Amino acid sequence: MRRGLQPVMEGRRILSATANRADLRFPFPERFAVRLAGRTIISMGRRAKYLMADLDDGEVLVMHLGMTGRFLIEQSGAIQAPGEFAQTIHRLPLHDHVVFEMEGGARITYNDVRRFGFMDLIPRTAIATHPLTKDIGIEPLGNELTPERLAAFFSGKAAPLKAALLDQRQIAGLGNIYVCEALFRAGLSPRRAAGSIIRKDGAPTARARKLTDEIRLVLQEAIEAGGSTLRDFAHADGSLGYFQHRFKVYDREGDPCPNPSCAGVVERIVQSGRSTFFCATCQR
DNA sequence: AAGCGAACCTGGCTGC
DNA sequence: TGCAGCCAGGTTCGCT
């Protein structure tokens, strides 16, 4: 999403911003639209699942998509750079909550059916201490994620691997889909205690190394493929992500295990209220 | 302290 | 056709 927004936002001035309601998951900050109008976006970044537009007045526009949030970019009234599947877009104007008119002619609309997303303005200097962002864990694609770091997180943990990987305070940015996919690829049961893939002396096992690798690989492949995009959840450029076609286990309950050397079947269980998809035969 | 379930909100799908 | 019930990508809160 950041990659899609960058060309139309970075280095551009926000001509106007409009909020069509008072809140999403949280109320919009005070004088939200007024504070954004006329500001230039110095850079369009991302940290964990937060989009961060760095503004020229020292504030950062922090945006989270929640579960159903999406952006639509239109240029002169037309959808810009429609992807192969652009015709499948069915935007619901009812849920268009925020509109940015950008210098350069792009109109960027934030649409969010369930309103679990939010936007906030936070001083750049306060990002490190702000309640929303202070406890964010390491980036899974950066240099920080190593088997040793994973071991430090998981050592002694009784919580299942599934829950440990979803904990944004440790590794930030893995959601339900990618946790399921990474565990399948690593051949690890989502029910296994996180601490069980760490040696007693705190050193990573081969399992922990494999999991570290597969976390990176699945995310890299997903970004390359254009993201996950389920159902009506579209990309910044309006096209739908391709990676959904590549899920091995997510939402594939009842399918034969995609591992060719395995005769198992993909199961669905519920862990801490979330669906987990996995093969109990080859994920141990 | 850790871990779990409920809550937030809306809409789509399934089954009766 | 109508309607109840269940499910959904994320995160936080409060209760064991």
Image (cartoon, coloured by chain):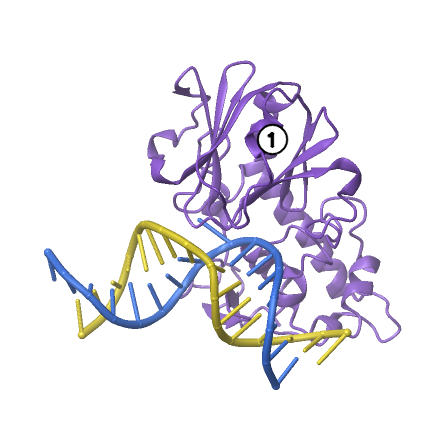
Chain colours: A purple, B yellow, C blue
The picture places residue A206, in percent across and down from the top left corner, at: 77, 64
Q: Quadrant of residue A153?
A: bottom right
**Which image quarter is the N terminus of chain A in?**
top right
| Nearer to me, A196 or A156 | A156
> Can the viewer see residue A221?
yes
The residue under the point 54% across, 36% down is A226
Q: Secondary structure at mark 1?
A: helix
Q: Label 1: which residue?
A: A3
Residue, far right: A201
* Residue A12, image x, y percentages: 62, 18
User: Nearest the camera: A155 or A29?
Assistant: A29
Q: Amino acid at mark 1?
A: Arg
**Chain containing mark 1:** A
If the image is split into quadrants, where does the C terminus of chain A sit? bottom right
Up/down of A106 relative to C7, above or below: above
Q: Residue at 44%, 31% (x, y): give it.
A: A238
**Camera sees residue A190:** no
Question: Is A84 left, or right, of A178 in this rendering?
Answer: left
**Number of numbered discs overlaid on the protein picture:** 1
